[in-house]
Image (cartoon, rainbow, N blue to C red):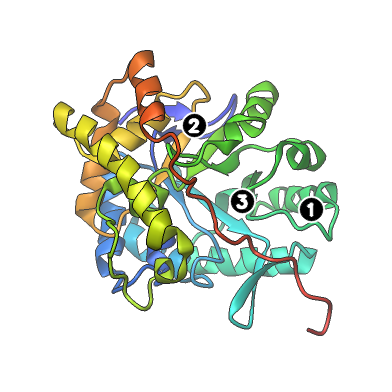
Amino acid sequence: MNRLPLGADGPRVSRLCLGTWPLSGLWGGGIEPAVHAVRRAFDLGVNFFDTARAYGDGAAEAALARGLGDLVRTHRSELVIVTKGGLRIQGNSVVRDCDPEVLRSGLVASLSALGTDYVDLFLVHWPDPTIPLAETAGVLAGFVEEGLVRRTGVSNFTAGQMAEFGPAAVAQVPYSLLARGVERDVLPYCRAAGVPVMGWASLAHGLLTGALRPGHTFAPDDWRAYSPVFRGERLAAVATAVDRLAAVAADRGISVAQLALAWVLHQPAGVVPIFGAQEPEHVEDSVRALEVRLDEAELAELGRLVEGAPPVLPDTEPPHRAPAGV
């Protein structure tokens, strides 16, 4: 798999990044097949792995370390590991909290779970409006000086928030055929500022695989069972759009997931898609998206096929942190 530099002086990364939210235990069923998918991804050329402290309160980070196994020791310089901080578990919810001590304690816990002395990229998971973003950027810069982090960046920031934060080595944004809002201002900002972009939920949490149909029954421990995105008329409308994509994919002899990832890969913004995999076969399917070629007319047609479908974005954003003592 070809690897390209992430920015002007960034690490060389695969054109696809494996996301590890499915390793959190929040997607239903056991995680062992997803753990095996990590090693399969590396064997197929993926060296770019995305995780976060908030994914199961560190469960995904620990599972990623298990999946990588001895690669963390023998191939550490080849691996590019991204984790994120600035969210805190509070009761049964997750809240935004970029207090410097919360960021530090979270990063230390992440390093321990991952079994590494440093992470290649450490991102603010969601902006915390109670703390100046430039101040948060300074805290992260201190982690770089300490050698705990190689580079820093942001996730789920608006263009204005990115400008306030200052230089970032990467920005993560929700981006797929079913989530294109960032094309209005965030992607143009990143292009002008020279900030590389990673697109999360490039398969729309499984909707762009074609496997989730109206009436689908999710396991009780699958977060999607409680999201309105995956129920009723909203799911039916998305499924209708995905059916149109599936017809195009079938004509080409490829999967819907391959078509959806190829669409992201062919966008002029140069976004690196983050894809999830609950088993090794999902990795094998997704990686073949790199073989798909789409011209401008085909890209435009895919966009037209999903017009009118409700966007698949987080139905709730993490709330701001509660007052002290709550």
Q: Is residue 188 left or right of residue 275?
A: right
Residue 119 on image: x %, y %: 56, 52
Q: Residue at x 58, y 81 (%)?
A: 92
In the picture of the structure, the residue carrying the numbered disc 2 is 271
Q: CA distance from mark 1 to mark 2?
A: 25 Å
Q: Is residue 287 visible?
A: no
The numbered disc on residue 122 is 3
Q: Mark 2 belongs to which amino acid?
A: Val
Q: Residue at x 75, y 47 (%)?
A: 141
Q: Residue at x 49, y 71 (%)?
A: 56
Q: Mark 1 belongs to which amino acid?
A: Thr
Q: Are marks 1 and 2 in contact (CB under 8 Å)?
A: no
The numbered disc on residue 60 is none
* Tag 2 secondary structure: loop
* Tag 1 secondary structure: helix
Q: Is residue 282 left or right of residue 226?
A: left
Residue 244 on image: x %, y %: 27, 36
Q: Is residue 226 above or below residue 324?
A: above
Q: Mark 3 belongs to which amino acid?
A: Phe
The local crowd at label 2, few if under 14, some if 14 to 19, many if 20 or more residues have their Cα within 10 Å, is many
Q: Is residue 58 above or below residue 38?
A: below
Q: Is residue 246 visible?
A: yes
Q: Residue at x 57, y 28 (%)?
A: 7
